[in-house]
Image (cartoon, grey):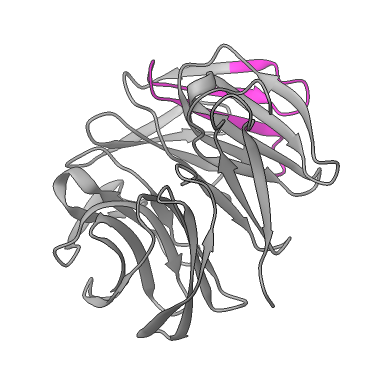
Amino acid sequence: MSDVQGRIDHLSVDLNNQRLFVAALGNNSVEVLDIKGAKRLHTISGLHEPQGVLYAPGENRLFVANAKDGTCRIYDASSFQLLKTIEYGEDADNIRFDAPAKQVYVGYGGGALGVLDLSGNKLGDIKLDAHPESFQLEKKGTRIFVNLPDSRKIAVVDRKKKAVVGQWETGGALANFPMALDEANHRLFAVCRKPAVLIVLNTDSGAVIAKIPTVGDSDDVFYDPTRKQIYASGGEGAIAVLEQRDPDHYQEIARIPTVKGARTSLFVSELGRLFLAVRKQGSEDAAAIRVYAVSQ
């Protein structure tokens, strides 16, 4: 991606067609990459600081959330024709998909989750105390866990009621941006930046179970249920790999050097791969996606 400038934000995957979608925030574009061929297929340009990107499998729709103009744009994921633009006012950010309900959630503004159907019709808003960063949906339950770093809390939302039903403390750690969920073991993982720690919470009670030092300036974290591992990518310049010994005990088992500023990533369990976004470094090193195979 030699012509891609500036910060790179979140990623999404199309498994069937082996495509990776990259929100190139600083370049005002979404880059569409061929995973197997390791090449660029298409560029969606003319965006306004894209942050969140979501491919809806089976629907052939691509959702892109833009920070600068507060829009969520929906594209046909084959032709890349713009189908609809939804206005959220400001700072449209992370996007998540509730596949059984065929609904999309968009975090935006000073504190809300917008709910859309796959055609882009607004189904409502869930008000929050502060701007939402990463959030995760239960698959077997109705809750959404939402990082609210500006209010130093994690909000618990009931998506059937479209309302906040609880708020949890982060154990004194601040700047909780990335989040992952181990639903089977009732554990929530939030990575804080001040200090750089992974906090583990019990999703039944909200109690902090463990705090483990981790990589700094993290913006994405993933739980791998097959290998019982957690992967956190940090702008400090490393990927931290933590082992889940049991639901209450964790330890870091590897710290893989990367590049300073490379803090966003995507773990694809079906491929056993972690895709790390690396922004352009100086005049010679182009922006790229680094691919890491996870150990068995």
Of 218 and 114, which appears nearest the observer? 218
Quadrant placement of the N terminus: top right
Q: List x then y, in percent, for residue 282.
A: 54, 28
Residue at 17 percent of width and 42 percent of height: 129
Q: Is residue 133 above or below residue 167?
A: above
Quadrant placement of the C terminus: bottom right
Which quarter of the figure has residue 203? bottom left
Q: Is residue 265 above or below residue 64?
A: below
The segment highlighted magenta reads 57-83
Q: Is residue 202 visible?
A: no
Q: Is residue 228 above or below residue 235?
A: below
Taking the image as shown, residue 144 lies to the left or right of residue 153, namely right
Residue at 54 percent of width and 53 percent of height: 258
Residue at 13 percent of width and 63 percent of height: 172
Q: List x then y, in percent, for residue 147.
A: 29, 51
Q: Is residue 13 above or below residue 233?
A: above
Of 34 and 278, which appears nearest the observer? 278
Q: List x then y, in percent, for residue 136.
A: 42, 55
Of 149 and 24, which appears nearest the observer? 24
Magenta region includes residue 74: yes
Taking the image as shown, residue 76 lies to the left or right of residue 267, namely right
Taking the image as shown, residue 285 lies to the left or right of residue 205, namely right
Magenta region includes residue 54: no
Seen as rendered, the residue at the extreme top is 46
Of 174 and 110, which appears nearest the observer? 174
**How many marks do you count on the picture?**
0
Seen as rendered, the residue at the extreme right is 37
Taking the image as shown, residue 109 lies to the left or right of residue 171, namely right
Q: Is residue 197 visible?
A: yes
Q: List x then y, in percent, for residue 40.
A: 77, 30
